[in-house]
Amino acid sequence: MRTIDWNDESNLIVMIDQTLLPEEYKVIECKTLASLCEAIMSLRVRGAPALGAAGGYGMALAARLSSAKDMDSLIKDMQVAAKTIKSTRPTAVNLAWGVDRVLHATDDAYDLKSIKSIALSEAKRIADEDVAKNRKLGEYGAELLEDGDVVLTHCNAGKMACVDWGTALGVIRSAVEDGKQIQVIACETRPLNQGSRITTWELMQDNIPVTLITDSMAGHLMRKGAINKVIVGADRITSDVVFNKIGTYTHSVLAKEHEIPFYVAAPLSTFDLEGWEDTVAIELRDDNELRFWNGKAIAPKDVRVYNPAFDATPMENITAVITEKGVYYPPFLLDELFI
């Protein structure tokens, strides 16, 4: 199934609970706005494109659950829901993009029923478009990979980060689909190990050769000449930087030092035309994500913790950005991508 979807029979959101992977594959339901917000904050659903779909479906769910008796009241309920959903992950721009797109689509509604119908139709359209965009993105990106390449990736930018196919892993999947022999080096991605838990699981499901390393081993392998390319996803791309999972910047510095191409794969919905590094709030996660693992203490319980979810990689460290419209090489004007 898709990472996140709408169940037409039950009129609710269904998703794969990514916190349980790889030990358990489980589909969960979100019947309320609170349950969706909890799923987003706890990373049961994560990844920029998947969050875009979650935002859209969240607005459709809010419209369905509202007890409003007139259009103005329903729109107000949805606006409150929009603010609540957006607050769950402030750095990832796709979440707000999905919320706003559905909210704006209801401007054409003419009664209560049409608001709910339009909201759901637009949310489904966002999900369908995500799959098509990532397929196209994968085709463009595959041209950058050569037969025999060993590609380093960080965190998870695959099916589980999208509705399907993936961005960074979508490029790799497309290259393999073209008949190229590609091997992947997956960083574990501390502190929640999305790389070891999810990326390796995804690639093994597709029989794509993958080797797991700790985050701190990347430089060692680059120095040995064991890595040909780096491909990562993105949670927000502004005029000057790419925000992605913490640790991405470090890999970009290492790649630049060793003259290894460093690619970012992301749909255009991840671009923030008005944003700059100093205008974006980086999400800080719970301190206990570093103090505990699987309920077991791995640090003193009162140790001071700094746990940002993302870092910023400057454009000068990026070889190219792969989108559904093609491959773009910095420096570029972001508004040129949307012509």
Image (tube, rainbow, N blue to C red):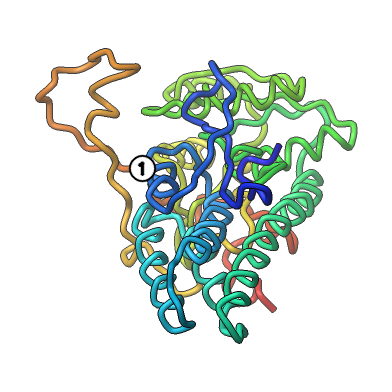
- Residue 243 % position (x, y): 44, 52
Q: Is residue 294 above or below residue 338?
A: above
Q: Is residue 299 left or right of residue 225?
A: left
Residue found at the very far right of the displayed protein: 179
* Residue 3, above or below 75: above
Q: Which residue occupies the foreground of this view, 228 or 74?
A: 74
At x 45% / y 48%, what residue is drawn? 36
Q: Position of residue 227 (x, y in %)?
A: 63, 27
The residue that appears at 69% across and 20% down in the rendered structure is 204
Q: In screen coordinates, is 241 left or right of 323?
A: left
Q: Nearer the viewer, residue 92 or 261?
A: 92
Q: Residue at x 46, y 20 (%)?
A: 214
Q: Quadrant of the N terminus?
A: top right
Q: Is residue 46 above or below residue 155?
A: below
Does the rendering let one see residue 310? no
Vertical relation: 329 (above or below) 309: below
Expressed as whole percent of the image width and height from the top left, the position of residue 216 reads 42, 23
Q: Is residue 300 left or right of residue 279?
A: left
Q: Nearer the viewer, residue 26 or 271?
A: 26
Label 1 secondary element: loop
Q: Residue at x 41, y 45 (%)?
A: 35
What's the amino acid at mark 1?
Answer: Ala
Location of mark 1 (residue): 309
Res 176 seen here = yes
Badge 1: residue crowd in 10 Å (few <14, some 14–19, many ≥20): many
Dividing the picture into quarters, in which one does residue 275 lie?
A: bottom left
Q: Residue 38, located in which quarter of the rendered image? A: top left
Q: Position of residue 21 (x, y in %)?
A: 53, 23
